[in-house]
Image: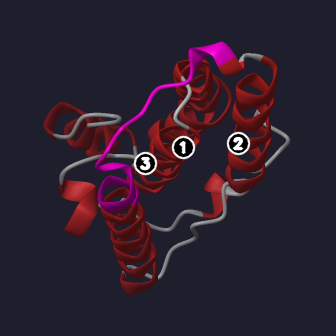
């Protein structure tokens, strides 16, 4: 079973960021000022980095793949660490980076891209991953899904 998403999530992040910059450039009248933007951006980037690093650590600890194109090589369900709170912490970290970018750009129009990113990653990456995990670990994966939400 191959994934429907052919472009890996970090590249999707870059594409989304480019779209956010473009919207800001072409729709400058949607600008806003946020006085605490720098501390908020730093906090979001730090939290995103922490979540992403912990997710990679959990994959490594369980000796299974984290590569988004090869979910069929998964050797076990990672359900501890940050995966005890979200089935997709790495995608949450990418989402937090986009939110930080939107705050940095200080333009309401840039935030339009965020729900599109969530939809796209869910539809073309997460759902195919879930189908593969269900195929590989049916009962265990179903039990995990009952305990832990997809995004938050």
Q: Quadrant of residue 122?
A: top right
- Residue at label 1? 98
Q: Which of marks 3 and 2 is nearer the N terminus?
A: 2
Q: Where is residue 8 in the image (x, y as percent from the top left)?
A: 76, 50
Q: Which residue is drawn at 45% across and 37% down?
A: 134
Q: Where is residue 85 in the image (x, y as percent from the top left)?
A: 19, 50
- Residue at label 2? 17
Q: Which residue is drawn at 38% across and 39% down?
A: 138
Image vertical order of residue 132 relative to residue 111, above or below: below
Classify mark 1: residues with Cα within 10 Å, few (<14), some (14-19) or many (20+). Answer: many
| Discs 1, 3 touching: Cβ within 8 Å | yes
Mark 1 lies on a secondary structure that is helix
Q: How is the image coloured?
A: secondary structure
Q: Alpha-carbon distance for marks 1 and 2?
A: 7 Å
| Discs 1, 2 touching: Cβ within 8 Å | yes
Q: Earlier in the sequence, mark 1 or mark 2?
A: 2
Q: Residue at x 66, y 64 (%)?
A: 67
Q: Where is residue 137 in the image (x, y as percent from the top left)?
A: 41, 48
Range shown magenta: 29-41
- Residue at label 3? 96
């Amino acid at each position: 079973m191959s994934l429907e998403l052919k472009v890996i999530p970090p590249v999707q992040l870059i594409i989304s960021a480019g779209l956010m910059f473009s919207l800001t450039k072409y729709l400058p009248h949607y600008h806003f000022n946020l006085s605490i933007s720098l501390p908020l951006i730093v906090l979001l980037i730090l939290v995103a980095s922490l979540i992403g690093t912990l997710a990679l650590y959990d994959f490594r600890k369980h000796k299974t793949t984290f590569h988004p194109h090869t979910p069929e090589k998964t050797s076990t369900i990672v359900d501890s660490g940050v995966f005890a709170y979200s089935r997709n912490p790495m995608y949450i970290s990418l989402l937090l980076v986009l939110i930080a970018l939107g705050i940095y750009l200080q333009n309401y129009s840039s935030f339009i891209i965020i729900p599109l990113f969530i939809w796209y990653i869910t539809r073309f990456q997460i759902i195919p991953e879930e189908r593969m995990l269900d195929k590989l670990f049916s009962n265990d994966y179903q039990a995990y899904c009952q305990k832990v939400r997809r995004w938050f």
